[in-house]
Amino acid sequence: MFGITPSARLRPSPYYEATVAEGVRSFTTYNQMLMPTGYGHPDQEYWRLMNGVSQWDVAVERQVQIDGPDAAELVRILSPRDLRKQVVGQGKYVPMCNHAGVLINDPILLKLSENKFWFSIADSNIWFWAQAIAAERGLRVQVSEPDVSPLALQGPRAVEVVEALFGDWVRQLRYFWFRETELQGIPVVLARSGWSKQGGYEIYLMDGSRGTELWNLVREAGRRWDIGPGNPNLCERIESGLLSYGGDTDGTTNPFEVRLGSYVDLGVADDVIGIAALRQIKAQGVARRQLGVVMEGAAPTQPSFHWHPIHRDGRRVGHLTNGVWSYRLTRNIGFGLVSSECEAGDAVSVHQAGKVIDAQLVELPFL
C-alpha cells in the first residue's frame, strides 16, 4: 500500500476531505493536484455512471483566467478555432497549439463577459504559456488562476439532481453553455458539460473554502437517485472515444491526428499561434491517425505507464496509447495512434509486456 507525502507543490482539492470521507482508494496527479481515480468498487462505479448519477471531484480541471481590455484578442491568438461568434454564457471546445502546430492542450473556453474568459484546461501549464504570449504581444490583460474548482455530476440521472438543486431552468442549458448562480449562498457557475458521453453538468465552485459544504449539498440532493462517488471513468471514456491530452498525445501530435480537425479553422488570421504550421500539415497530409483497437483475449487489460507498439504485417505502424477492459463489449479495447496508411478493419498485433496480442483496428467511438 502506498501513501501520499504532503508537499506544497501538490495541492489538495477543496473536495479532498469529502472524498476521503467517501472512502477514496486511489489518486493520480493532474495539474499539480490530486484527482481521485477510484473508491474501491470499479464495477459499481462504472455502472452508476452508465445508469444513474455519479459525483466527481474534478477540481484538477483548473481555470486560466484572461481578463482585461485585450482579453478577447489574446484568446483569439491562442487557439486556431474561429471564436468570433462565441457569446457570453457559451463554452467552446478549443485546441491550443504551439508555433509548430503541436497540440499543447484541449480546454473548454468559457466566455464570462466581453473582457473575461476562462480556459478550463487539461493537464499542462497554460497559465505560463498565456502569460508569455500576452507579454510578447504587448496585450493589456491579466492572466491568473482564479479560486475556481469544478465538481461534476455525470450520468443519465444527473439532470434530475441538478434540477433539484437549482430549479427547472437547468434543463434549458445547451451543451457547453453555462450560467453564473449560487447554491445556498455558495457562488458557482453551472455548466452543461463533463468528461463523459452519459450527459451531465459541472458546478464550478468559486469559493474553495466551501468545498465540503458543496459536496454534501449535492450528495444529499442526489440521495433519492442513489448518487455515489466516482471519477472520470477510464472505461467509459475509451468506449466513448474521448481524447485524453497527454495520455493519447505526445510531443509531436497535431490536432488532425487525434480527430480534432473539425475544431481547426484554417481561415483564421495569420497571427494565430500555430496556424501557419497547421495549414502546411493539412496541405502535406497527416502522418498518423487515431483509430480504435479491439484486442483478443479474455484477461482484462491493466492501465499502463507506457504506450505499446502496434505492428501490421511484421512492421511497426504506431502505438497503443491506452487500454481497458470494456464492460459493454466484454473485450479489451484501446486507442491506436497509427500510420495514416492504416485503415479500420486492418489486422494488427499489439506488443505488450513481452506478449504479442492479435487485434483489429476499428473506427472511433466504439459505442
Image (spheres, grey):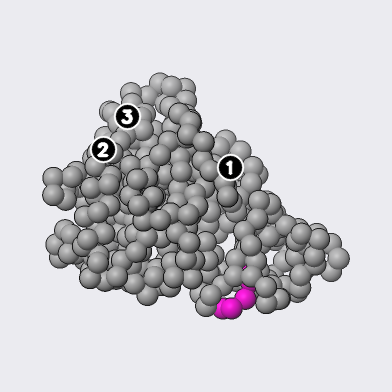
Query: Where 354 falls versus 14 (above or below)?
Result: below
Decide which of tag 3 and tag 1 comes sooner along the chain.
3
Mark 1 neighbour density, 10 Å: few (under 14) some (14–19) many (20 or more)? many
Say which mark, if any, is on residue 271.
Answer: none
Q: Which residue is drawn at the image coordinates 81% and 61% (left, top)?
A: 354
Q: Secondary structure at mark 3?
A: loop
Question: Quick check: 236 left or right of 62?
Answer: right
Query: Which residue matches tag 3?
Result: 70
Q: Position of residue 334 (x, y in %)?
A: 62, 65
Nearer the observer: mark 1 or 2; the answer is 2
Q: Amino acid at mark 1?
A: Gly
Query: Which residue matches tag 1?
Result: 101
Nearer the observer: mark 2 or 3; the answer is 2
Q: Is residue 321 visible?
A: yes
Q: Which residue is drawn at the image coordinates 33% and 42% (left, top)?
A: 14
Q: Which residue is drawn at the image coordinates 84% and 62% (left, top)?
A: 315
Q: Position of residue 367 (x, y in %)?
A: 51, 74
Say which mark, if any, is on residue 209.
Answer: 2
Magenta span contains residue 37? no
128 or 91: nearer the viewer = 128
Q: Position of residue 127 (x, y in %)?
A: 44, 32
Decide which of tag 1 and tag 2 comes sooner along the chain.
1
Q: Amino acid at mark 2?
A: Ser
**Picture quadrant where residue 303 is located:** bottom right
Highlighted range, magenta: 329-334
Q: Secondary structure at mark 2?
A: helix
- CB of mark 3 within 8 Å of CB of mark 1? no
Decide which of tag 2 and tag 3 comes sooner along the chain.
3
**Label 1 – label 2 distance at C-alpha:** 39 Å
